[in-house]
Image (cartoon, rainbow, N blue to C red):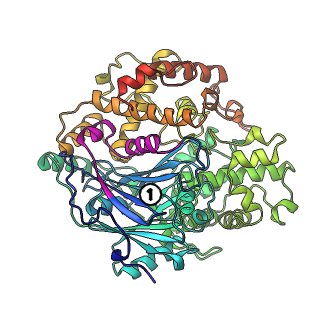
Amino acid sequence: MAKKATDIKSPAQNKKLVSNVTAGGYNGKILRVNLTEMTTSTESLSEQFCRMYIGGAGFIAYYLWKELKPGIDALSPENKLIFALGPVSGLNLPGAARNCIGAKSPLTGGIAKSEVGGFWMAELKRAGFDAIIVEGKASKPVYLWINGGKAAIRDATKLWGKETLDTEAAIRADLGDKRIQLAMIGPAGENMVRYACIMEGLHDAAGRGGLGAVMGSKNLKAIAVRGKKLPKIADPDKFKELRQKIVNIPHPLSENGTGSLEMLWMEAHAALPIRNFRDGVFPEVSNIHSVALKEIGMRIGMKGCYACPIRCKKVVQSDDPFHIDAAYGGPEFESLGSLGSNCGISNPQAVCKANERCNAYSLDVISTGVTISLAMECYEKGLLTKDDTGGLELKFGNAEALIEVIELISRREGIGDLLAEGTARLAEKLNQDSYSYAMNVKGLEPAMPDPRAMFDFAVGYALNPHGADHVSSSNPGWQEGIEQFGVILPVPDEFNPRRMSLFKLNHCLIMTQDLMVICAFPPFDYDTKLDLIKSVTGWNTSWVELIKAGERVLTLMRLFNTREGFTAADDRLPDRFFEQKIDRPFSQPLPVKADIEKAKKYYYTFMGWDANGVPLPEKIEELGIE
């Protein structure tokens, strides 16, 4: 029987908390949940802290650095799972429907952080909190219920084992409100698949780094949220003006979302990941890109996040040859690549079904597809046999095997138990030459932009603190307004100091998006982003302050990883990314290891780190890091 809020001891529940934050956009409160003690409490935020770390990934990096003991097991009660909003999260603005989730990663052993869209963060902002810190482990399955500033821990025993669709329906029925939003896990999270994700709703995933496994390790099935009151913003008129400016700009993703005809271009130029990033020819891509899904009648609509008119998310359904539930949305570019071309799968129904199963089980589509593609190559080379796979013919292009092995991974059954560990551990288990085609950076499987086609992504994959994440990678180019940051002369393509100085600038600028927490899709130019945070918070801030905050958080993440044993040697790419594809060479020069090493040294210098990538004491002091 579900426990009532009064059944749970909450030390601060009746204590009036006065926040030190006077800036707009913040509630000034963090909710701390101790599942071992079954207690909840609230803590205030100071304005100085908010200006230094802003929100999102900044809050996460700070608390993980401050509160985690070095060397803990990521799946132990000592790990902390943090959900953090930014000052604009949940406001009535395109691109503001995002929050960040982080923990020590069970996949990499370093820091993990992942941004996610949808509707959940809008309810949390209205419920009166800027972040949630979950610590400890419940003795049995539970879920957290947050309603209008109050929190209760409730029994979830009957929910354990349920897929995300059934979990959402059951909790909404239990609480009697269909508008409740959930952050939740499915069976993959419960079984601590190392790349399990956290689903916010049925088709928005905090995908990277195994955060769903951390949630499962705590016996936490879901966080249900409902709220009704937004915090004030400093300049409502200016905010309204900025909102209208963004709303009135048409967006190309509104038509077909991600994974459109650019996939045809990528295949033609050897830039599409095909069969574990090995091959360059896959004409069957014409069957699986997003326009093709529309043309064959599978795509039945488009949806968007809270307050966003772009509506970039596909909705697909089918009954032949697989039943595909439209409630789970549809595949984005990363799914079409990782579960499609990278596994040699050309059947659009199979790719969409695989995507649906990942959302139902709470699996990161990127790590799932890349890990399966490694297994398929190992099967092709005889490093895995039918005896290992339980008779499953796990070869490239086998659509039925793709869907079956996703089931096995989520339940950790048979070969799925091994694949649930990710590419690095799979290669370690198989040994032999599988290391050379185990595609990961710091243990995190790469996203679908092939870094051989975009050199700045190659450096970004190597240097990102949490691994080969495309969203955090820098692709400088020449952007309107960049002159205000002192970039006047055109920057050459080679990895020279000027190029890496621009890379460092972009890395910090991208991080500011993860602190505010805003989406990369709406057409925010530099002036609009700055005006946005000023109008919401009321701070007389500038890009100097914001870039410093981005640098502070990147440095804090580096300190965390250094404490966990990471070195400059971990800032490396898989050998395959320095090789031509076997059946279609790149027209441009490939990345060269010596250039990557040179680029790393430049980056370390510009960041104020030593030759081994360790932040210097002077830089730590400059940034005000404890």
Screen quadrant of the C terminus: top left
x then y, percent, for residue 215? 52, 60
How many other residues sit within 10 Å of disc 1, few (<14), some (14-19) or many (≥20)?
many
x then y, percent, for residue 607? 45, 23
- Residue 401 in the figure: left or right of residue 510: right
Magenta-drawn stretch contains 421: no
- Residue 477 in the figure: left or right of residue 17: right
Label 1 residue SS: strand
Magenta-drawn stretch contains 44: yes
Residue toward you, 579 or 68: 68
Residue toward you, 412 or 393: 412
- Res 563 quadrant in image: top right
Residue sitting at 38 percent across and 44 percent down?
Answer: 59
Residue sitting at 33 percent across and 73 percent down?
Answer: 179
Q: Which residues are magenta?
A: 42-69
In this rendering, does residue 321 appear at all? Answer: yes
In this rendering, does residue 301 appear at all? Answer: no
Residue toward you, 285 or 351: 351
Residue carrying label 1 = 134
